[in-house]
Amino acid sequence: MCNYCGCREFPLISRLSQEHGDIQECAGALRRAIREGRHGDAAPLLDELLTRLLPHTVTEESGLFAELRAEGSLAAEVERLCAEHAGIHGVLGTIDRATPDWPAVLEALDRLYRHIDHEEHGLFPAAVIMLPLDAWDRITPGQPPAGLPPEDRSAAGRPG
């Protein structure tokens, strides 16, 4: 994860980035279990990954991606990322537990790694530039207005 553009100062980006780290950690454990032939460990790790991944994707698509789609500049990129979500979920969510296709899981994990990297180093920094502050307020309810210094947050009627 990058730390140079400041996009993690936005609460939603911070949350999504933390979730990306958790997802990657779980995906790495799953990858190791598969490669080491520990398939008895792999199935529960796949379940754990899906438990983390599915709500994360809903948050991205219903919040940040919806605002980016409405703004328009990155709409094509958002559609591509949503298609990647569907493809990754389509593999990971439909693995036959009786006869799992572990090579397909490994391929989906590779795609997931590239997908997260693209969001972290491309989409998230671009979103900070492209979205107006009122969009951030809509997708992070209860948070201080994005971009306000801490001393101005209480004056805006929001906790600091």
Image (cartoon, rainbow, N blue to C red):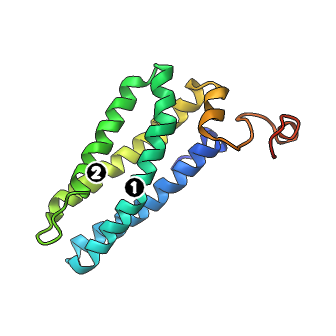
Residue 127, quarter of picture: top right
Relative to 87, residue 134 above or below = above
Task: Report which quarter residue 29 is drawn in.
Answer: bottom left
Quick check: marks 1 and 2 in contact, CB under 8 Å?
Answer: yes
Q: Residues within 10 Å of mark 2 (few under 14, many from 20)?
A: some
Residue displayed at 17% across by 65% down:
102
Residue 76 occupies which quadrant of the picture?
Answer: top left
Q: Report the Cα–Cα distance between label 1 and label 2.
A: 8 Å
Above or below, 15 against 106 in this view is: above
Query: Dot 1: within a 10 Å radius of its alpha carbon, few (fewer than 14), some, or many (20 or more) residues?
Result: many
Residue at x 23%, y 50% (from the top left corner): 90
Question: In the picture shown, does residue 138 fall above or below 14?
Answer: above
- Above or below: residue 79 compared with residue 39: above
Q: Where is residue 144 drawn, in percent x and y?
A: 74, 40
In the drawing, does residue 12 fall left or right of residue 83?
right
**Does any portion of residue 3 appear in the rendered image?**
no
Front residue of 112/93: it is: 93
SS assignment at label 2: helix
Residue extending farthest to the left is: 99
Q: Residue at x 61, y 29 (%)?
A: 135
Q: What numbered label is drawn on residue 89?
A: 2
Q: Nearer the viewer, residue 105 or 99?
A: 99
Q: Tell me residue 86's x, y (percent).
A: 28, 43
At mark 1, the secondary structure is helix
Number of the label disc, if any, that sits on residue 38: none
Q: Which residue is mark 1?
A: 53
Question: Residue 101 placed where, x, y %?
Answer: 14, 63
Asked whether residue 48 is in view, the answer is: yes
Q: Identify residue type, mark 1.
A: Leu
Which amino acid is tagged 2? His
The foreground one among 39 and 62 is: 62
